[in-house]
Amino acid sequence: MKSIYIIRHGETELNKQGIVQGRGINSDLNDTGRAQAEAFYQTYKYISFDKIYTSDLKRTWQTVQKFTDAGLPWEKLSGLDELAWGIWEGKPNSEEAREAFRNMLQCWQDGDYSAHFEGGESVQDVYERLKQPMEVLSTRPEEKIVLLCMHGRAMRVFLCLLLGKPLSEMTEFPHQNTVLYKIGFEDGKFCVLEFNNAIHLNGLIIG
């Protein structure tokens, strides 16, 4: 069985402020995010990963940088980028913004997966572009153990895609920063081996 470790990137300052980043904002990890990344590395550095995959956005590759600095093969897949939130990316966490996002999430919950903000993507758009990373994971048998770092909303969509679940169930995947979902792949099927694992964050003290 192939083992796929899927994690969300560490915290950024915009995460901390409750501001949506999306695909169009290429932010760095903050001190908390770097501590989370270090905690993940210290917990999983003994795993012999055959390949590291990240999105094109630096908050993902900063999260796994200790692994890539150690010489592990690394590839960026743009399909793993976060959903583009269009005109709302980087906007202050105001009541107007929160209302807009509540309305959009309700549209998706009601089954309108093509709904999107001006200049942004729908969850259906993200679902379609995530088929390419899914194909990569499905067709490289020499890569037995893989680490993949991506983004919260895209990760929820990706897990629905891999597990054959409808997008209406994407809210059932918690996604705090650096949370781990371990996925198995065997005989053409993906399955969950570990769900919402944050054991590496236990006892993490942020200065």
Image: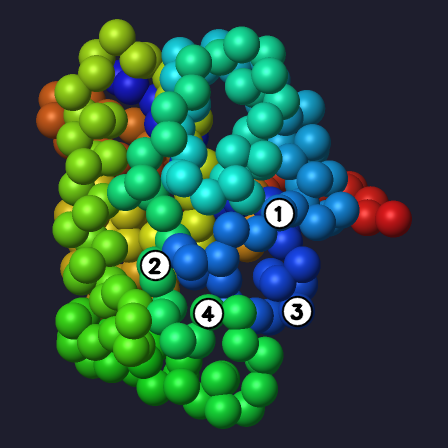
Does label 3 or label 4 sit earlier along the sequence? 3
* Label 2 – label 1 distance at C-alpha: 17 Å
Q: Find out whether the residues at labels 4 and 2 contact each other: C-beta distance under 8 Å.
A: no
Q: Is residue 35 above or below residue 104?
A: above
- The residue wearing badge 4 is 89
On the image, which quarter does residue 124 sit in? bottom left
Q: Quadrant of the N terminus?
A: top left
Amino acid beneath label 1: Asp
Callout in the foreground (3, 4): 4
* Label 3 – label 4 distance at C-alpha: 13 Å
Instruction: Say if residue 174 shows up in the picture.
Output: no
Mark 1 surroundings: few (<14), some (14-19) or many (≥20) residues within 10 A: many
- The residue wearing badge 1 is 28
Q: Find out whether the residues at labels 3 and 1 contact each other: C-beta distance under 8 Å.
A: no
Amino acid beneath label 3: Gln
* Label 2 – label 3 distance at C-alpha: 19 Å
Does label 2 or label 3 sit earlier along the sequence? 3
Most distant residue in the right direction: 207
On the image, which quarter does residue 17 sit in? bottom right
Callout in the foreground (2, 1): 1
- The residue wearing badge 3 is 17
Could you tell me which secondary element the residue under label 1 belongs to?
loop
- The residue wearing badge 2 is 83
Amino acid beneath label 4: Glu
Q: Find out whether the residues at labels 2 and 3 contact each other: C-beta distance under 8 Å.
A: no
